[in-house]
Structure formats: C-alpha cells, structure tokens
Amino acid sequence: MEALFSLVVGVLIASGTYLLLRGRTFPVIIGLVLLGYAVNLFLFSTGGLNTHAAAVIGESTVPTDPLPQAFVLTAIVIGFAMTAFVVILAIRARSEMGSDHVDGQQGEAGDAK
Amino acid sequence: MSQHLVILPILMPMIGALILLLSGKAPDGFHRRLSVALTGALLLISLVLLGRAASGELLLYALGNWQAPFGIVLMLDRLSALMLVLTATLALGCVLFACAGEDIRGSHFHGLFQLQLMGLNGAFLTSDLFNLFIFFEITLLASYALLMHGGGKEQVAAGLHYVVINVAGSALFVISLGVLYGATGTLNMADMANRVAEMGSDQAALVTAGALMLIVVFSLKAALLPLYFWLPRTYAAAPAPVAALFAIMTKLGLYAILRVQSMIFVETPAAAHITTWLWWSGLATIALAGVGVLAARDLRPLIAYLVLVSVGTLLAGVAMGTTEATTALLYYLPHTTLICGALFLIAELIGQQRGKAGTRLVRARRLHQRHLLGGLFLVAAVAVAGLPPLAGSISKLMLMQAVEGSARLWLWPLLLLAGLCALIAMSRAGSVFFWASYKGEVVAGKVGRTQLAGVIWLLASVPVLVAFGGPIGHYTQATAEQLASPQAVIHQLLEGGTAPDLAQLPRLPHDETQGEAP
C-alpha cells in the first residue's frame, strides 16, 4: 500500500508542478488543485498508513493518529477557499486584460515570454 | 482578566473585522472611526504586553486550557512583543492614511485590514507550527483582497502572480509540516525542539529535509533571492496604505525563520545548511536589490527594492547567528519597516500632485505643496539610506561590528554599497520630483489632514528610535539573549505555563482532537 500511495502522491505532485508552469491561467489553476490534492493525501499519510483503524479510542483494536485527519480537514477548507479565490481572480484577469495568459499578453508575443 | 491579555491582539481585530464587514451599509465615518480606534487600542495592548515581556516574563495562554504538547499555546516572549508593537505602530499610520479617501475606492477596506492584523498578530503569538500555517493563510487571504482593493489592470496582473506563487508556497508549507510531523510526532515548537534533540540519525535526515523546506517557504514570504521576483511588481501595484502594511509581511517570514531556527533547529544538522543558505542568499539579495534600486524608473518599485535591501540585510544578520548580530538586526527591524511604510505613503502623496506623471521619474509639472513633501521625502530618504545620525546608521554599524573574520569582506562592501545605491537613487528621485519641473501646478490632490497624520506618525518613529536608542538597544539585546537560550523557554512552555487547576479537570480521552480544531 505504501508504494501505491507514494506513487499516487508523486504523480499528482509531478502533474501539478508541470501544469503550474504553463502559460495560461486555466492549466495553472488545475495545477494548483492537483498540488492541493497531493498535499492533502501526503498529510493524511503522516500519521502512518493503517487499515481498519479508527481515529477514536475504543472503536477499533489499534487506534490511528487523529491529528493528521484534523490537519487535512483544515488544509482542505483553506485549499477550497484559495481555489475559489484564484478562479475568480483568473476570470477577472481575463476580462480586464483581454487574455487568459498569466502575463496578460495576447497571442504569440505572450507565449514567447 | 490580565491573563487573557495575550489573546486580545487576535480576538479584538477579529471581532472588529466582523463588525466592520457586517455593517457594510453604515456610513464611512463610522467605519473609519471604529477602525482607527481598534488599531489604537491594539497599539495600547501591545505596549502593555511589551512592558510585561520586557521584564523577562514569558506569558503563556493555553487555548481551551489544553496542556502544552496537546493543545495550542500562545506564547509571548520579547520577540513576539516587539513584533506586535511594530505591527500596531505601522498599522495605525496606514489606517490613518487610508481614512483620507483611499478606503472608499473599493469595498470592505477596514474589515480586511483588521483581518490582516489578526493574521499577523496570531502568527507572532502562536507556538504551534500548524497554527502558524493557519495564521499565515489568514494574513495571505486578507492581503490578496487588500491588494485588489479598488483594483485596476495593473493590480489584477500583479495580484495573479502573487496569489499563484503564494498558494504554491502554502502547498510546500503543508508538505514540510507533514514531513516534520511524520518524523517527530508533534507540531508544538517546544515539544518538537525536545524530540529533535533526542533524535536518532535515521530520522535526522527527514527532519533536515522538513526544516529546509520550511525555510524555503519562509524565504518566499520574506522575499529572499531566488524567490523575490514577485515582490517589486506586487508592492508597486498595491494601493499605498496596503503597500505600507505589506512592509511588515516580509518581516513575518523573517520572524518565522528566526523563531524556528533559534528554537527548534539550532542544534540539528539542518542548522548549518540553513545558515549557509541564508548567508549567501541574503548577500546576493542585497547586491541584486541594490542594482534594482538604481535601475528603477518609478518611485514605487524603487521603494520595493529598498524593502528587498533591508530583507537581505536582516537575513544575513540571522545567518550570522551571534547574539550581537541578532541585537543589531532587531534594532534595524523596526526602523526599516516603519521607514519603508512611510516611503510608500509619501510616494502616494507625491504621485497625487503630479497628475498623469504619477510617481514615474520623469519631468513633470511642479508640485503644489513642494516644501511639505520635500521635507517629508528628505527625512525618509536620509533614514532609508542609513545616514547618521538616524537609527539606520547605528544599526548597520552594530551589524558590521558583529561580523567576524572573512565574512567581513563580503558583508561590509555589500552593505555600504547598497547604502550608496539607495542614496544615489533617492537623491536622483528627489531632484526629479522637486527641482526638474515645468512651470504650472496640478492643484488637485492636496495632502489630506489624516494622510499627513499617518505619514508623520510613521516618520516620528525615526527620532524616537534614536532618542530612546539606549532602552531599545537593551531590550533588543535581552531579546537576542532570550533567543540564544531557548531551553528556558521550552521548559517553561512544556511544564509551567498552564493553569494550576488543570489537574482537577475530568479526563476526557475521547476529546483529544478538540485542541487542534481549525
């Protein structure tokens, strides 16, 4: 399970980083979202990967660490708010600058930079 | 009552922000008066806290009365108190300035401003790394919105870059917290310091990786060399009172570096990597920012590069790690923050009297109130270039004395050259603004009373820092000594700080997570 888990996190981080470096705002936002997913999964795993282990004492034979779950919940909420803000900002930038390029330049000149 | 004083710098701006945001229909005068009153009260509370902290007392506040390694504990030591007072002083100047009309160019200026203060104060007070992350995010979210305040094209373009790089930085922040939590099993700074000290070599590699990632994130916020390219454009585009408040945002990154470096990582293998990295990046930041200061063609980016010079100087001081260097940089910190804030405000005043030319360094029509603005600009320019007799020169002298051996060969020329660059650039800017002008004046844009009050409030800090140089110097030295011996703080945080009646509380094993709820 550890290998699969780390592979998933690694692929998500790699794809997120690649998309983050693209020139248009939409791929950049998708990149940020993927990065956020990867981070949440990673944070979830820091308490150790267990199956059939509840975060409440007495519910299962071996309880798991509840703190990472609280961290992930917080990180999800913050990530959600940030994503919503970036989306609105990108729409605003598109309408103000007439281009969805992150540098605000239309066409070839913008792409070359 | 007095034990709850520690949480007031967080609670008061939060409640104030809620009132300000929910009373959107109320007249502007109400918002302005409430906002100024809140910021003034914040300054008073911070000063009281500073007085308490100055005696060497460590004020602890266990949220929900959960004991230190399990719950979140707010901790006020000398460094936190210094940062709180600095934030409140700067904020009062900014909010006064904004009351002249900048605040009604967009919506909810004062509410967002208070939220940003809440985030800053929380970050300075907390002793828990995840809590630090939360307060960083609060600060950032408020700063995104403030940056867009009254937004134009330039602000949106700069804001997009700022937001994207900071969201990516936050992702890295969470990853490093995950690594550190996985390796140590705690996020309380004092507890982590203890566990890191007892750690075996197999875990040490993980801690080093986590520590370095954490420093990268904080360097991004502090705008250290490879990570500062977002700063000049953002600060130049932000509305003046917001840009002035942002002068403390880079210092938030610096504070976080100073805190984790002195408290957690000081005796780990990571410490050597961190100091080397900070030293060279800090020096390179000074050098490149000096070039930027000379190359800037507009006053606002010029000031943004001056902020970068101070960031590089401060972080090189952190990298030295000696008590003398920390004393010097803590004395330099309030001076440079308040002056850079004041400069952003002065730039706005100059820009609003030059019509279309704005703050660009070109010939334009003569300024209407040239004597007043010239005087303000002169004081700020002398202060920011670090000329005697002001605090900038004294603190730079202290910093240069603190360097030892071959490091002198690097720091001395760079620091002095950066000062020279600032001097040249500011004299050139001043000559263009006040002497190289056409006849005829733009009558619009007269300096408002509250605008002037805000600028003078910030500039007044310059003589105050010199006049009370003795007591302030003693305080920063005591702060540096406190930072140099973290064991006492750690011991007190883990053992003594909680309320005495904690032992009598019923044991509730099922509620373990409550102390960490967002």
Image: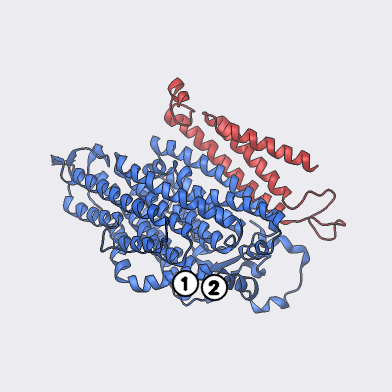
Q: Which residue is mark 2?
A: B59
On the same chain: label 2 and label 1?
Answer: yes
- The red-coloured chain is labelled A
Which residue is at 47% across, 38% downward?
B161
Task: Report the quarter where the N terminus of chain B lies.
Answer: bottom right
Q: Colour of chain B?
A: blue
In the rendered image, the residue lying farthest to the right is A61
Q: Chain of mark 2?
A: B
Q: Quadrant location of residue B200?
A: bottom right
**Residue B436 picture location, percent across and down:** 16, 41
Proximity of marks 2 and 1: CB atoms separated by less than 8 Å: yes
| Res B389 visible | yes
Q: Is residue B338 left or right of residue B122?
A: left
**Residue B444 picture location, percent across and down:** 21, 44
Which residue is at 49% across, 28% downward?
A100
Q: Viewer-proximal residue, B341 or B318? A: B318
Q: Vertical placement of B185 versus A13: above or below?
A: below
Q: CA distance from mark 2 to mark 1?
A: 9 Å
- Packing grade of label 1 (10 A; few <14, some 14-19, many >=20) is many
| Res B27 visible | no
Q: Quadrant location of residue B97?
A: bottom left
Which amino acid, mark 2? Leu
Q: Which residue is mark 1?
A: B49
Which residue is at 65% across, 38% downward?
A13
Q: Which secondary structure lies at badge 1?
A: helix
Which amino acid, mark 1? Leu
Q: Is residue A96 left or right of residue B277?
A: left
Question: Which comes before the other along the chain, label 2 or label 1?
Answer: 1
**Residue A34 picture location, percent across and down:** 64, 37
Q: Which secondary structure lies at badge 2?
A: strand
Q: Chain of mark 1?
A: B
